[in-house]
Amino acid sequence: MKKEFIILYLLIPVPIQLKASDAVKLSLAADMVYSQAINSNSQADDKLVMRGAELSFYAPIDHQFDGLLSAAAHDEGGETVFELHELNLSSSKIIPRSHFKIGQFFLGIGKLNHQHQHDWSFIRAPIHHAIFFDQEGTLDSGLEYDYLLPTPWISHMTLGITSGHKWGHSHTAGSRPKIPTHYFRYSQFHPIGRTDGIEWGINTARRKDSQGILSELLGFDLTIKFREGKVIKHKWLSETWYRHQKDAQLNSSEQIGSYIYYSYGINESFSIGHRLDGYRDNSLINSLTQKKINNIRYNNTLDFTYYSSEFARIKSALSHDFSREEGVSKNRDTRFEMQFVFILGSHPAHDF
């Protein structure tokens, strides 16, 4: 009888463990991109690249906290690099009208930084995003706090401070900064009917790296969506960012960049979109005359997307990237790209 009791005691925790594990959501997102050069100056690879495979686990930890872990394998110059993306503890139940997280995460500024690369509406990052942040988003470790303001409209205030060791996409621990990264975002969402709406945000970020370079960024983002049934009929996305930098010798530079993207939903399976980028470096100096160089860089992209479902899509795009200095065109890059994205398992809810 004693032996049977011991066996029964050992078996009791088994169904409890299984029930707890059922709450863990698992997601695998795969992102493959093929690039084909159209002109001789293009930097396209002319091959299919396994750009990323992201594995995510997320679930409530208990009645107060949630947990997220995501790791990704990326193609870096033909080599696959596996790294931790996000690992954080969060809660929206401890402080009224608030959500906070601590750990490693993508910084809650702008529009693209709120989404993983495979969730973007376009294949490649806009020009200024790649220069100011990275080809993906900017992640670091620290604390982020979001507060839902008691206003008639939906408005959020987000504050964050992170170690500042990393900025952009980094495979190392980074270096200790002079001033850690700190940022602020204020956003408002205005519903139009039951399914449509407009969201805009004002963003600022500041840091001083280990070399003493002070970076200050100011940005504005806008999202507009109109639905007809299940179809997002019209969608506008836009971000504008200004960056000012000053080094240890007090030499300063400033750049500004912007993009606007519009997509039209033909039906549940197809959409067509167009993105226009612009970027300007206000600090370029002619080495002979010591005068500022009049310059601007453009990107013009037309894309077509097929949605098999919310878990799989194929996007094709034709883009033309070029710059002009003192009225002369240069660095022309025309390419054709195809992106294949699929998601296995569940997927966290997307931002508006």
Image (cartoon, grey):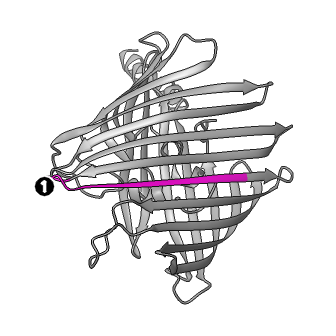
Residue nearest the observer in this picture, 348 or 272: 272
Q: Which percent across, then down, holds residue 245?
A: 28, 51
* Magenta-tinted stretch: 247-262
Residue at image position (63%, 12%) is: 152
> Can see residue 44?
no
Residue at image position (70%, 63%) is: 314
Residue at image position (49%, 30%) is: 59
Disc 1 target residue:
249
- Other residues around mark 1 within 10 Å, as few (<14) / some (14–19) / many (≥20): few
> Can see residue 138?
yes
Residue nearest the observer in this picture, 251 or 346: 251
Which residue is situated farthest in the bottom direction here? 40
Q: Which percent across, then down, holds residue 206?
A: 30, 40
Q: Quadrant of the C terminus?
A: top right
Q: Which percent across, then down, holds residue 49?
A: 52, 73
Is residue 260 in the magenta section?
Answer: yes
Which residue is situated farthest in the left direction here? 249
Q: Quadrant of the N terminus?
A: top left
Tell me if 5 is positioned left or right of 152 in this view.
left
Q: Amino acid at mark 1?
A: Gln
Q: Main secondary structure of the magenta part?
A: strand
